[in-house]
Structure formats: structure tokens, C-alpha cells
Image (tube, helix red, strand yellow):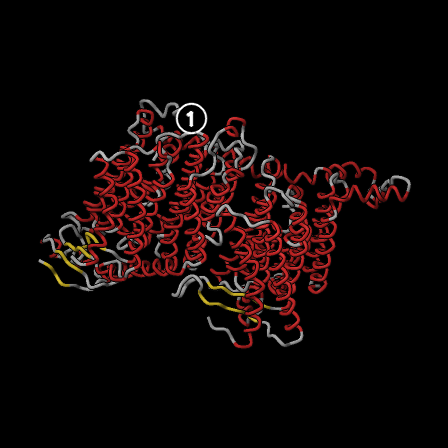
Amino acid sequence: MSLAPSLLPQAALLAIGVGGPALLLAVLAASSLVGRPLPERWTARLTAGSMLAALAAFGLGLAGTLTGRHEPGLLSYGAWSTARPGGIALEFLVDPLALAFGMLTAGIAGVVSAFSNRYLHRESGYQRYFVLLALFVLGLLLVALAGNIEVLFVGWEFVGLSSALLVGFFHDRRAPVENALRVFAVYRVSDAAMLSAAVLLHHVAGTDSLSLLFGGSPTATALPGPAARGIALLLIVAVAGKSALLPFSGWLPRAMEGPTPSSAVYYGALSIHAGCFLLLRAAPLLERVPEARALAALLGAATAVFAGLTARVQSDVKSALAYAALTQVSIVVIEIALGFYTLAFLHLAGHACFRLLQFLSAPNVLHDLHALEERLGTRPIPGPGAVGVLAPLRLRDPVYLLALERGFLDSALDRVLVAPFVRAARWLTRLDGRLCAAVLPREGLGPAPGPPGPGGEADE
Amino acid sequence: MTDSWWWLGALFAGPAAVTAGSFLGVELERLRALTVAAAAWMTVVALGVAWQPDMRAVLLHSAALAWTAGGEALLRVDALSAALLPFAAGLWLLTVAVTPQAALDRGGLRRTAVATALTALSFLTESALVLLACWAASIRTFVAALSDPAHAVQRRVVVVYLGAATVVLAVGVVLLVGPQAGHPVAATVGTWLVALAALVRMGVVPFHAWVPEVFDHGRLGPAILFSAPQLGAYAIVVLLLPGASPALLRCLALLGLGTAMYGAALALVQTSARRACGYLFVSQSALVVAGLDCTSTPALGGGLLVWISAGLGFAGLARCVLVLEARRGRLDLSRFHGGYDRMPLLAATFLAMGLACTGFPGTIGFVGETLLVNGAVDVFPVMGFAVVFASALTGLAVLRMYFALFAGRPGRTEAALPGLGLRGREAVTFAGLILVIVGLGLQPRPLVDSRLEASEAILARRQAHAGGNGASRASPAKRAGAPVTHRGAGSHGAGHGTRAAGSEIP
């Protein structure tokens, strides 16, 4: 590892900003693993401390970068996995965008952790929740600061896994667990697209550096057109999966099964914006691929209309908020596609904070409504809204049904993708059975031995 | 006898003691304790062997059984075997430490010791005939574990599939090392036959059907111990890689990649946890086969690393299933079993092992798969996309199993079961396994360097073979067949091409 002296302050701040959540994760996970979880008070203090430290580190880094005291650049820690050539490098891109998103992440996670401390007080999964929250924060910080595709992927995977496990947090009920699996399935598609982009980049350019992919390098233009197009399109698929853009929007209401603070931090504030952040990072690449920009804008517009309509007919407040958040996320995507990067980031940051507040106050919504009714002395009845007024009479019912059924996205995916896959896999399983039976022409496989009861069979 | 030979003696002392104890009528409880101690001892010694550069001087060399110039190593420790020995010993320790006491009788304990000794001996040899003998003996041990009449069908499946694989391997080896070894047709046919045998043993499609059947209805414990070390992969490395044509290796890689996706996809829809484990094994072992396509040093190093990570991850995951079965009976994945709160460590272990199989960051699996993909993608981009796809499916399959096994409300019967929590030995073993998987994932450098070193040696051997192909086939040393005991001078190479000549001992 050799860093330029001008990058040392950034490296120190990075160590605090990323190292804090990493250490927190290690401590919480290890204490859970050995069956001695930390007391709630200590868990909350450690979490708050590490988030505050990260917030301060990224804040200082951002201030230093913006005032010209610190130099933005690539912090490369060399081959981490091996002393030989060809290993995996640890690279962090420390620039204003990364530091600002890191700051936003640490700040919002700090607020949510303080809220969660009370919300989940004496909950049996308290420690598990904070382990997963630490994993999420670490993952998102790695996404923000990634300098090469491996680091980006590590962060992307951490965010995905923690998200799925938090959706299934109340795992003694069936619905959260089934929905968590659904969410994870979409995330795997997103991950696969991201990794495929990495594979393509590696194949075409022989590197995994994001500066080549995202244009910070002088060799950025060396990426040939078709390859750039392929990588950009794969990245858009990855973004669509992570940010619930069409056609992947079906998982969003399912993700509301998790505890409210986690819904707030994931689907109101941060995780849902991870895709937007990636698009911002990839902006130079998008500029070279007009088709990708057009696709992003189209996806954003379609999702905004869809989510806007769907949000209006949701019967539970968290789903309504989730779709409302998706509307804004889609607009951010459109802004990025149109090249308004600063506006997009400000929109992203403002929306994340605002939606966080809405989600965290969601459990109080009935209380607030009652208070409102008491003040008004009557129950406010919502009007038909702009859609109800403007939509032609003939279209109202189909549009209402479409919104109510959330675009039939899940059932369409089930019919088109899941059902044929399951049918084919089961047929192949039966085929395997027959292949095996074929070597036993006389007796075939016969009935399986009866299920062993508790205590197990003699099985070394 | 030098220190190195004492180390090797100490390595096999554990299995020997257990085997002897089982025949000498040592009381069963003591024998169990002895087995756990012996497995722990073997693991420590194997780590010592791997750690010491001096151990690379161990070489028992002979031209009697060889087809390459100057003979081959009947027994040697090199970069390849250095990490495989602790791997084999660790699998034994995992087996005996977490298997319920009632499930390990005297014969079972002996079989685990013999199987491990055979695996370790296989990893120490480059001789085709010695490897063939170990291969056949390990299958014999596995078949013996299925001697119960309830498993007669599965025993027959194993005998037919693996017996045929052994015959095919034997013919292939004879063609490679027999009197006709110099003939190009014999060499080609022999190579393909060896490849075929390895594919059957590793359960690569279309020779995989025995795996899910034996895992599901046979005995899962012996199946894990038999399959996790992946002797088929070792046969490919030792017998095929030096001389196999790129076309054959590419063919194996394509079969492996197809199987990796196939196994993961089928694991996703199984309703039996055991069968799902079977398909996961098929997927993981196929990934190892694909990784042995010699495209580059990092890619082959990644493949060798995936071998260890997939073996450990799969064995740990399947052991978790067995531990659960011991408490709940056969596990059906179409419903939720609950119980996370009563055994969070087991749930965490299951998840960590499964994630290692998927190449999840923070586990050793991630390092292996990344090296493999990054190293291979330049010349074989299909590898990258296929690994990505297989990994995505494996991840889904693992999370589905995790939720089915640990989430939900336990049924009335299960909730009433006493002792759902882990015993002390199980808890320590599983916590240690997580530490190994995650520790090597966070600090992979020693293992990765060792795999890359082995990879370089294999590729050097391949180059040397390509250079001296004709000469080696007509080697007078081989024709003379004179046994030579030889102590090498500490070369780190895995093969003959890189090994320095040492002093001969009459």
C-alpha cells in the first residue's frame, strides 16, 4: 500500500468513516455469535457513536474537498487478497459525490438507530436488527466510496442481504418470510446484472476500475461503443432492480413487512436511492450511450406514472409511502437521464430526509388523524384528486383496478417467469429420478425409507 | 527419518489410532472421544505441515508406476497438497464433532477415520495407480456405510455409478501408464476416460443422477464426508491437467458451468432438504470442475480456492441440516419449521456456509469466485456470466432453505421437543467454522498465495509436459520400472517439470 501524501487526510477520514461501521458490525455480530449479545444500552451507544464518527469524518472530508484543502482522488490499497499479481484490489474513490452520499448515509442511519433503540426496545430480535443495520450502513458506504467494481459489488451485496433479512425480521410469521424471499429474488437479478457488467468491463477493457467505466480516467474513451452500450444497459437493469423501477416494482410493497425503522431507512431514504446514486456515478458513461439515457428516462417516466397512481389507492400507510417514494425516485432517475446531476443529487438528499420523517411518523398516523379531526370537528374526506377529475370516465375503472392490483406485476412475473421455471425444474428432477432408476432395471428405486424421527438415523 | 517424515507420520497417527481402537474393542464412549481428539490432532498437524516450507522436501519418488520422464511422486507435499491436507482433516473434525453420539457407532467411527486417511493419502500422491487404489478404497468405504438393508437401493446406485466410474478410471489409467502409454491414441482415450470417471464421481451432468438419490434417501453423513473433499477434482488436477488438450479442458469447463447452473436451479425447487443439499453439491462441485480450465494462473488459482471454499461451505451447510434432522426428523422445505430463537448459532452457521457457497463477500467463497471470474474472463467470458448466474440461483436456494428451516412458528410437536439448542461441542465447532469461513474471507492472503503458487506449478508442469511430450512417453526410466526412493531438495513446484533433483537413497 502506498498513498500519495496529499491523500493521507482523506485516507484517515475514510478509515474512521468506513472503519467505524465495520467495527460496529464485527462487535455486534461476534457478541451475538458467542451467545452473549450486548445490553441494549451499549448497542445503542456503540451504534450512535460509530454513526456520529462516520458523519463527522465524511463531513470534514467533504468540507475539505470543497474548500480545496483535501484532494479528491483514488485511494488504492493494492492487492488485498494476495501478494502476487492478479489479486483483488481495495480501491476507494473519494470525491465530493461519494463524501456527500456517505454523509447522508451516516446521518440518516444515526437518526434511524436512535429511533430504533426505542421502537424495538425489548424486542427479541433487537440485536439481530442492529447487526443487520450495521451491515447495511457498511454496504451503502462501500457503494458510495467504491473505486472499483469489486468494492461496489461487496457493498451492493451487503445492502441486498441485509434488506432481505430485515424484511423477514418478524420471521415467526409466514408473510414476511415469503416476501423477503421475493425481495431477495429481485435483488439477485439486480446483482447478476451488476456482476455481468463487471464481467463485460473486465473482458473488454481488462480492468475493473470504475474510473474507466465512469469516465474519471483519461482512458475512459477507450471503451468501445457496443461494450459501453452493453455495460450501461446492464447497469440500468441493476439500478431498476435495486430502486424498484418497472418492471421490478412488485417487490416494494412486499418489503414493507419489516420493522418500520428499517422500512424508513431502506425504502424511504437510502437503499431505494442506491440505484440513483449508481446512475449518478455512471453519468459519464450514460452520456456516451444515448440509448441508455433514453431507456433510463423512459423507465423513470413509466415508473413515476405507475407509482403515482398506485400510491393513491393503497390502503396501508407504509405501502402508500413506499409508492410515493418510488414516484420521487423515478423523477430523480429522469433528472439524471436528462443530465441535471446537481439537481438530481439535491432532490435525492432532500427526498431521503423528508421520506424518512414520513416513514418514522407513520405509526402515529392514526393518532395524528384523530388529532386533526378533533381540531376540525369533522372527518376530512379526500376529494377525487387530479387523476379522478382529469381521467376520462371510461378509463377510470381500468386505471383504478390497475393501480389497486399494483399493475399486476407480481402475477405477470409469476406467470411468465416463475411458473415455467418451477415446472421445468420439477420435470428435470423427475428426469433425474428416472435416470437413476434406469440403472436398477429390476426393482427401480422403490419407496424411500421412512422419515427418521428426532434423534436421527445412524448417520456419521 | 527426518522431521518431515515424523510430521507425516503424526498426520496419519490419528486415523490409525481410531482404526486400531475400533478393532481393539476400546469402549465406545472413549472411542468417540478419541476420534474427536484424533481429528483435532490431525487438523493441527496438517496445518503445521501446510505452514512449514521444510515440508516441501518430503518426496517419495518412483519410476515404477510412472509414465512421465523420471517417474512420479508416490508421496509428496507441495503447494497443491499443502492446503488440501488441513481441508481433509478439518472435514473429519467437523464430521465427528457435530454428529449425534447415538449416530456414530464403532464401525462408523472407523469408517470416518479410514475415509479421511484415504483422502489425505490421495492428496499426497501424484501416482495414477496409488490414486486409483485410494479412489476405489474410498468408494468401498462409502458403500460399507450403506450396508443397512434400508439403504439397499442407494447402495446399488452407488455401486453401479461409482463402480462404473472406477472401472473407467482403471482402464484410463492403464492406457496412460501401461506398456502402450507412448501411443497417442491410448493417451487420448485414457485421458478422456479419466475425465469421464472424474465427472461421474463429482456428479457433473449428465452423470449426476446418483447424487440427489443418495443424498436424499441414503445416508447424508457418509455422503458428505465422501463427496466434500472432491477427489474427482484432484484426479483431474493430477492426471489430466499436465497433458490434457485445451479442447478437453474447455469441454469439462462447459459441462461444469452448465451443471453449476443446473444444480442451483434444481436446488431451488426441492421440497426435501437433503435433496436440495444434493443438488447444491452438484452445483458446487461442477463449479470446481469449471475452475480447473487452465486459462490463466489467477483463474486456476481461483478454481483451486473454490475447491476448498465450496467443500467447506457445502459440508458445513449439509452438517447443519443433519444436526437439525437429529432434532426434528426429515426436513421438508415446503413448510416453515421455526426455531431460530432456540438455535441462532446454527441458523447463523447455515447462512454463513450457504453464503460461502454463493461467493458472498466477506466469505472465502467470494475471493475464490472473484479470482476465477477475473482470471478467466479475458479468454473465456462465458465463464464469468455462467458463474454469475449460478451464484445468483445458489443464493436464492440457500436463502429459501434458511427461511424454511429456521423461520416460521415451529409445529406443536417440534415446539415440545426438548434440547433444540446446540450442545457445547456442536456450538464450538460451528462457531469455529464460521470463524474459518469469514476469517479466510477477510484475510485470504496466505491461502490465496498458496493456491496461486500451486496454480503456477500446475501450469509449469503443463508447459513442461507439452515441451517434452515425446521424450517422456519413451522414457527408459519408466520402461526399466526400477523403484527409486528419492528425497527432493525442497522445490515448491507441484510437478516434475519444476522439481529439483535430490540425492537418491538406495
B72 horizontally vs A349: left or right: left
**Image location of residue A348, percent across then percent down:** 70, 58
- Residue type pointed to by label 1: Pro
Q: Which residue occupies the foreground of this view, B212 or B388?
A: B212
Of the pair B143 and A408, the residue shown nearer to us = B143
Q: Answer with the quarter of the image where residue B336 lies.
A: top right
- Counting from the top left corner in percent of width and height, residue B443 is at 43, 59
Which chain is home to disc 1?
Answer: A
List the single residue furthest toward the right: A377
A30 or A95: which is nearer to us? Answer: A30
Quarter holding the C terminus of chain A is: top left
Relative image position of residue A27 (x, y in whole percent): 52, 54
Residue A95 in view (yes/no): yes
Q: Residues within 10 Å of mark 1 (few under 14, many from 20)?
A: few
What residue is pinned by disc 1?
Answer: A451
B314 or B160: nearer the eye? B314
Q: Please, what secondary structure does the residue beneath circle 1 have?
A: loop
Residue A76 picture location, percent across and down: 50, 68
Q: Is residue A406 above or below residue A6?
A: above
**Does A168 sit left or right of B243 as displayed?**
right
